[in-house]
Image (cartoon, rainbow, N blue to C red):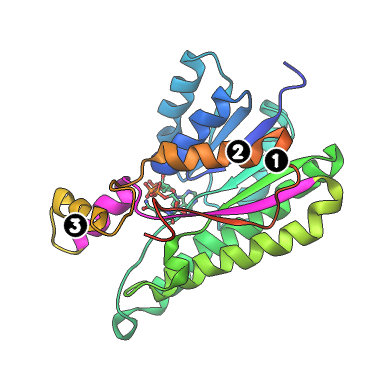
Amino acid sequence: MSDQRTAIVTGAARGIGAGVAKRLSRDGFAVAIFDLEEAAGKPVVEEIEKAGGRALAVGVDVGDEQGVTQAVDRVVEELGAPTVLVNNAGITRDNLLFKMTTQDWDAVMTVHLRGAFLMTRATQKYMVDAGWGRIVNLSSTSALGNRGQANYAAAKAGMQGLTKTLALELGKFGVTANAIAPGFIETEMTVATAERMGMSFEDFKAMGVADIPVGRVGQPEDIAATVSFFAREESGFVSGQVVYVAGGPRA
Ligand code: NAP
């Protein structure tokens, strides 16, 4: 048990993050479920434990510097030093530019970029000490530009620049950094987008599928499989990459 590696997945109470956490547990990692509310992460922990894995739910806002430090300290004490980090926590505050408030801009930058920065800075020393680490950042096809998402597109493009810089700085310590840019994934985030657009989720999905070469929308497991690849021992020569997981070149 003592040589088991520990992974932290942010925003892991539901959606893509929950799928990633369960997959990393099946891959043999102890997994910390970071989300705003500790209680929200508990069902994922229970599912992992029921399947024989080790997990811990931690309530933390990834944009809160002190909170992040305390949360990572708790993981070190209760699960072990984290050497895998998946920066997945995310929010949308969509609006056309002329209607986008400064708060909408700041909220999105805080969770995605400040959150990934704080989390990575707080965990990198454990990876450097171990001479091994895996960082996976969630970008999006929206990084290529998306109407109504000036804030989100900028943040998701920023995640790609952050990833490449982490790869450059941390490579010599055995740490890789890669980004995944999902297309349409069926989660509460896309359900909320459909609601905002005044469409049923079924109609919204059908509209999405029409533009996706493989002819279906994605599931959290599709992203989890890609995280699993990056986290693997034999993926140590793959770093600074952005993989679009979108059922085609882009969704
Ligand atoms: P989701 O279902 O909305 O889940 C996001 C999770 O992050 C929620 O549990 C949320 O907690 C948590 N979270 C939000 N702000 C946080 C904060 N400050 N600190 C800690 N946790 C926080 O979203 P998803 O669809 O799984 O998306 C996961 C990631 O993939 C995001 O980065 C998203 O931008 C990206 N992505 C998603 C899609 C897609 O189609 N779904 C496509 C491209 C990229 P609460 O429930 O308490 O709000």
**Secondary structure of residue under mark 1:** helix
**Measured from the top left, where is residue 98 in percent x and y?**
31, 86
Q: Residue at x 28, y 59 (%)?
A: 211
- Label whose residue precedes the other's in the sequence (1 or 3): 3
**Measured from the top left, where is residue 229 in percent x and y?**
60, 38
Q: Which residue is mark 2?
A: 229
What span is in magenta?
175-196
Which residue type does callout 1 highlight? Ser
Q: Nearer the viewer, mark 1 or mark 3?
A: 1
Q: Is residue 24 visible?
A: yes
Which residue type does callout 3 highlight? Glu
Q: Which residue is mark 1?
A: 235
Q: Give the alpha-carbon distance from disc 2 to disc 3, as whole Å.
A: 33 Å
Towards the viewer: 159 or 38: 159
Q: Which residue is mark 3?
A: 195
Q: Residue at x 39, y 55 (%)?
A: 183
